Amino acid sequence: MADGECKTGNNAKKVNLLVVTYPAQGHINPLLQFSKRLHHKGAAVTFVVTKFLFNNQPNSDHPPPFPVETISDGHDAGGFLSAVSISDYHDRLKHDGSQTLRDLIRRKENAGRRFDAVVYDGFMPWVLDVGKEFGLRTVAYFTQSCAVNNIYYHVYRGEIKAPVVAAEEEIRIAGMPPLTMADMPSLVQVGNPYPVFSDLVINQFGNVEEADWLICNSFYELEHQVLEGMENKWNMKPIGPNIPSFYTDKRIDNDRDYGFNLFKMNNEVCQKWLDARPKAAVVFVAFGSYAALSVEQMEELAWGLTQTNFFFLWVVRETEAAKIPAKFAEAMADRGLLVPWCRQLDVLSHESIGCFVTHCGWNSTLEALTIGVPMVAMPQWTDQTTNAKFVTDIWKTGVRAPLDDAGIVRRTTVADCILKVMDDDGGTEIRKNAAKWEELAKRAVDRDGSSDRTVDEILAQLVSV
Ligand code: UDP
């Protein structure tokens, strides 16, 4: 099917889609990007976020090319941070979210807009139930890797006992490398302090059998062994990487930013600073939108960065800034730049960047793979531990910084890992692999690539009903 068409011959019909995202930056980004792909292929998209987030986005210099509507999470004035607990937040999100989503669908139907399907974030399985009430087809979108979802699925079915404890025996799942406890997502490891989040990731699978399609933000070539291992049990279709088109196939005009930013960007400052640095001489450090490092870890990281002779650009969110050691600004002088947020894709693709010290959030991992940037993995929690395992041992595009007995990556380790990746000799293999994945990622979403074909197939099936 050609771009801009999800219509068939004389029976031309525009597919009308509702896309509902979980309210976090790492979920909005890929779902919004997927929506742009659908829109570019001719589908009509209505994108849905919570009212709180809609009213509190400081930047949207590239707003989405389709309507954005809101539902309530029960915390319209204060969002997630105003909830009394994580479980209170999720209960209200489900309750108030279901009600306001029903209202939204009804309102649109009354105005003559009938949706064909709802694409929803797997973290919110209740959207499927609402969609079914209105006779919509349902597409569950999983924002994490196939490997991570497969682990959760096995836990859901009781085929892996959780919480996983440190044991002599490694965990074996078809299509996956043998996994130790440290490679498993933290939410299913023993001692996980966030049981509510564990429930969230495991309960995603409660009604997946009712969904018409299960898709995830990955690509076949990246996880084909995992996908083949899953084949006899369940079927998830990769449709990613869902990253702005400017960084992949460039088929969508002016698509350089995700377009729904919850933090204020500092594009000009970063760009100017990076422009003045030599090629491949800067270490980019960022831990996503959510991870909070301990004060001790921040100190070790800070002094580790100054121990190498490389330049560094470090994203320290406002909520983390107080953990920066005193005298650090003085010590780093003009070798470092700290910003509260940046346009990560622009930074990663700048020619001055030599490596990415990352928490291995799935979007950051996919972005680094797609742009071809070697990584130093410092996973913090949730799926990041498993992503780090794949980055280092399967895709071989980085090294994982080992923890000491207190669970901290020490400053010398930070410096050693950066050296390993940036080094002219040692880093060569890693850079070669990074270049290979970059090419495969871009090809997957380009015309007739593996992910592109899957999206076309889903749209064609929606047209034919
Ligand atoms: N990001 C960004 N600027 C920053 C840090 C992160 O634009 O300074 C974006 C990044 O490109 C990614 C998202 O925020 O798309 C973070 O998602 P990820 O899954 O990596 O981590 P999470 O925030 O969910 O922990």
Image (spheres, grey):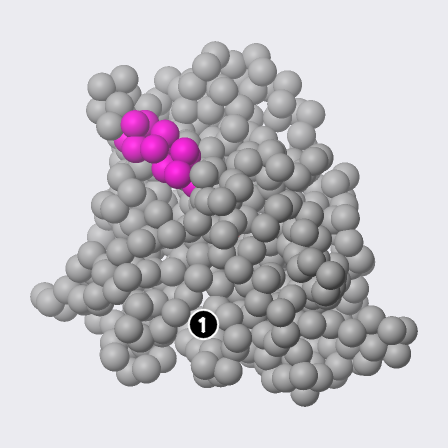
In this rendering, is residue 456 above or below 200?
Answer: above
In this rendering, is residue 108 above or below 319?
Answer: below
Q: Residue 88, how many percent across, how many down?
A: 61, 80
In this rendering, is residue 352 above or below 262?
Answer: above
- For mark 1, give the secondary structure: helix
**Residue 219 horizontal side relative to residue 462, left or right:** left
Q: Is residue 222 magenta?
A: no
Residue 173 seen in render:
yes
Residue 122 seen in render:
no
Q: Residue 241, how many percent across, how many down?
A: 49, 47
The quarter of the displayed image where residue 368 is located: top left
The quarter of the displayed image where residue 145 is located: bottom left
Circle 1 is placed at which residue position? 201
Quarter placement of the C terminus: bottom right
Q: Is residue 433 magenta?
A: yes
Q: Residue 184, how many percent across, how many down?
A: 29, 62
Nearest the camera: 150 or 299? 150
Question: How many numbered callouts?
Answer: 1
Q: Which residues are magenta?
A: 430-441
Q: What secondary structure is the stretch in magenta mostly built from?
A: helix
Q: Residue 61, how many percent across, how many down?
A: 77, 39
Instruction: Identify which residue is drawn at 22% across, 71% down.
Output: 165
**Residue 463 horizontal side relative to residue 299, left or right:** right
